[in-house]
Amino acid sequence: MPEEMSIETSTKRTREDEAPTQQRVKQTRINDYWLATVPTQNRYDTLQNHVEEEEQTAVATPKPPPIFVHGVQTAQPLRTLVHTLAGDNFTMKTLPDNTVKIQVFKIEVYRLLMRKLKENNTDMHSYQLKSERSFRVVLRGVHHSTQPSEIVEALKSFGHNVTNVHNIQHRTTKHPLSMFFVDLKPGPKNKDVYDINRLLGYVVQIQPPNAKKEVVQCTRCQRYNHTKAFCNRAPRCVKCTSSGHSSSECPRKSRDDNVQCVNCLGRHPANYKGCIVHKQQMEKAYPGLRERVREKRTEARQAENNQGMVREQPPIVIIPDQINTQHNPITYSQVTSGASGAVPWQGDRTISNPAGATPSFNHITQPMTSYQTDMAELRQLIKTLTEQMSTVLSLLTKVLTKNP
């Protein structure tokens, strides 16, 4: 009877028996959930906000310019006046020719001190505040016949406050050019004027002015490095050395050759560019390329000398060619392989000479001997040439005396 076949039922689940999978639902973000307004607090928020407010309100105010007071024979009254106005927030520096430099650190104190010094008719000069200096640009492309008022209104439409506009003339022919100097009132957006390329229908370019290599000269006292607007010194004439009157009050109304410079006492006006004082000021303010290179080389040489004086000289290490009296040459392979009889490199240390050894110093003495021999030969050659020249000169003398 055939064996009955046993059929085993598989308990493995099929794909059809699987239950449908549920779609995953994203978890609601806590920030989007209407009940999830979780209060978060940072204990440094207050400090950070306070710092940001200070940065926004803090405005960088430039330091006022210095005041130079001349002819100070007694400095105590001046110091008392400055101390009364500025307290301890000032510095004073003594300069040559009885000049005192005063530096205060607040603009209000600077203006008050300038007013007090002018009331006392003090011999002094200063400079313009940086916050009051105009922002000057060059306007190119506008016809020279354009009225300055039109340029002022056109730039005002771009948000720029113009204080002055004047046409630029040719330096030699004095013909008007299609360029204008434009002075803007100081402000944080002054540099935006460079982005303007259309003005009054013209295609224009607005550029910064070229820097002039010139020393400023005061037209009141005829001295250099300051202007008339901030000078309270005694007026001096540009044509004569008589004190007590300005150039406009000089009795010399006609041009003549009897002028004298008040700076160098030369026969020329005080504003002459060839004046020796003007040349000295120009060389000091704008040294030439050769002088700048010479100064740099001198500074570099001095730095090298200073380093050489501080630097210690390394010890001289003398390694004899051979410790024994017999000269046995050593090859590079013997030294690297450590063969017997070879003297390996011992580093930067002095090798002591064993007793009885007579090292050879031919590599040191030979160059000295050769140098001495060359010098002896050179002396002998010079001596021979001198004797020959004397003989030739004596013969020439005899010939000339016989044939006058």
Image (tube, grey):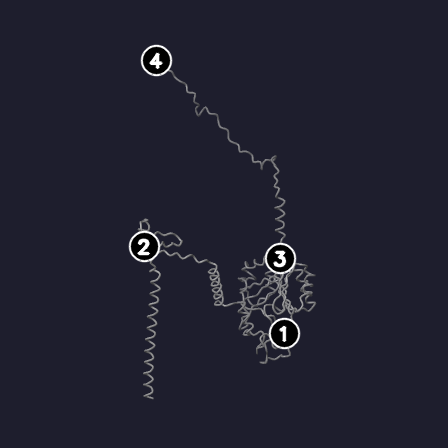
Quarter where residue 193 is shown: bottom right
Q: Circle 3 sits on which residue?
A: 61
Q: Circle 2 sits on which residue?
A: 324
Q: Is residue 349 above or below residue 202?
A: above
What's the mark number on residue 3? 4
Quadrant in the picture for the C terminus: bottom left
Quadrant in the picture for the N terminus: top left
Q: Circle 1 sits on which residue?
A: 236
Q: Quick one: SS at disc 3?
A: loop
Q: Earlier in the sequence, mark 4 or mark 3?
A: 4
Count numbered badges in the picture: 4
Amino acid found under the numbered disc labelled 2:
Asn
Whether residue 183 sits left or right of residue 395 in the image: it is right
Amino acid found under the numbered disc labelled 3:
Thr
Do the CB atoms of the residues marked 4 and 3 lie less than 8 Å apart? no
Q: CA distance from mark 1 to mark 2?
A: 92 Å
Q: Quick one: SS at disc 2?
A: loop
The picture places residue 153, in percent across and down from the top left corner, at 61, 62
Residue at 43% across / 20% down in the picture? 11
The picture places residue 225, in percent across and down from the top left corner, at 59, 68
Do the CB atoms of the residues marked 1 and 3 lie less than 8 Å apart? no
Mark 2 or 3, closer to the camera? 2
What's the mark number on residue 386? none
Q: Earlier in the sequence, mark 2 or mark 3?
A: 3
